[in-house]
Image: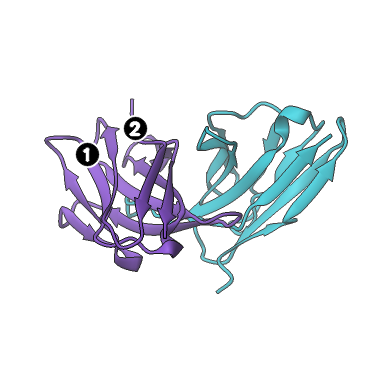
Amino acid sequence: NAGVTQTPKFQVLKTGQSMTLQCAQDMNHEYMSWYRQDPGMGLRLIHYSVGAGITDQGEVPNGYNVSRSTTEDFPLRLLSAAPSQTSVYFCASSYQGQGRTEAFFGQGTRLTVV
Amino acid sequence: AQSVTQLDSHVSVSEGTPVLLRCNYSSSYSPSLFWYVQHPNKGLQLLLKYTSAATLVKGINGFEAEFKKSETSFHLTKPSAHMSDAAEYFCVVSDTGNNRKLIWGLGTSLAVNP
């Protein structure tokens, strides 16, 4: 199994550009989420989804959009990149139903906005 | 509200000596608790998890943690540190309520000296 796959691994954007970070999982997990990791701040939840067609905001949603058209995919869109969005982004998935959530993470996307 | 506090931002030990990384949590529900490890420029890997079974949990690479409800603690230990243990460690709580979001500590950076 591939687990959780994120692309790209590295990206440099200019301020104002848009892009989509891709995330796919092959474990049939219903719950998927996006985090950003910044030095000294741990992981902060951006958006999450509890199933196809259902998304909700996390702790730091501003500047990001998500959609969940299939169980497998959960892309994160930056509509107009800002330097404050320079960060490492992690996608995670987990099994919903047991109530005891173990998250599986992708390898991360290191994004730099200049 | 749920929260996690990692009591030390940095811990430094000598190779072969014990490791103790401290974590306290606050939760309104019966919590699930996790420790994740992140090696430099890598993704996140689950070390161990507590899900209301045995209070002493054994994980990978010789790590273990004990759930102490009376102290609301979930400290991570290892009897003998190895150079390869140098990494960032995150304590995480997931409640059965609130859409099973993960609440992350800010991390503890473990340095292992030869």
Where is residue B17 shown, x and y percent of the image? 28, 58
- For the question of whether residue B47 can be seen, the reply is yes
Assign the C terminus of chain B to one quadrant of the image. Answer: bottom left
A79 in relation to A95, above or below: above
**Which numbered disc, 1 or 2, marks the residue that appears first in the sequence?**
2
The subunit letter for the residue under badge 1 reads B
Instruction: Categorize mark 2 by other alpha carbons within 10 Å: few (<14), some (14-19), many (20+).
Output: some
Local secondary structure at mark 2: strand
Amino acid bearing label 1: Ser
Q: What residue is pinned by disc 2?
A: B5
Where is residue B96 shown, x and y percent of the image? 31, 42
Quadrant in the picture for residue B30? top left
Chain B shade in the render: purple
Q: Residue at x 29, y 41 (%)?
A: B22
Farthest residue in the left direction?
B70
A5 in relation to B27, above or below: below
Amino acid bearing label 2: Thr
Farthest residue in the bottom direction?
A1
CB under 8 Å between discs 1 and 2: no
Q: Residue at x 53, y 35 (%)?
A: A44
Q: What residue is pinned by disc 1?
A: B73
Q: How far apart are marks 1 and 2 (CA)?
A: 9 Å
Q: Which residue is drawn at 34% across and 41% down?
A: B93
- For the question of whether residue A30 can be seen, the reply is no
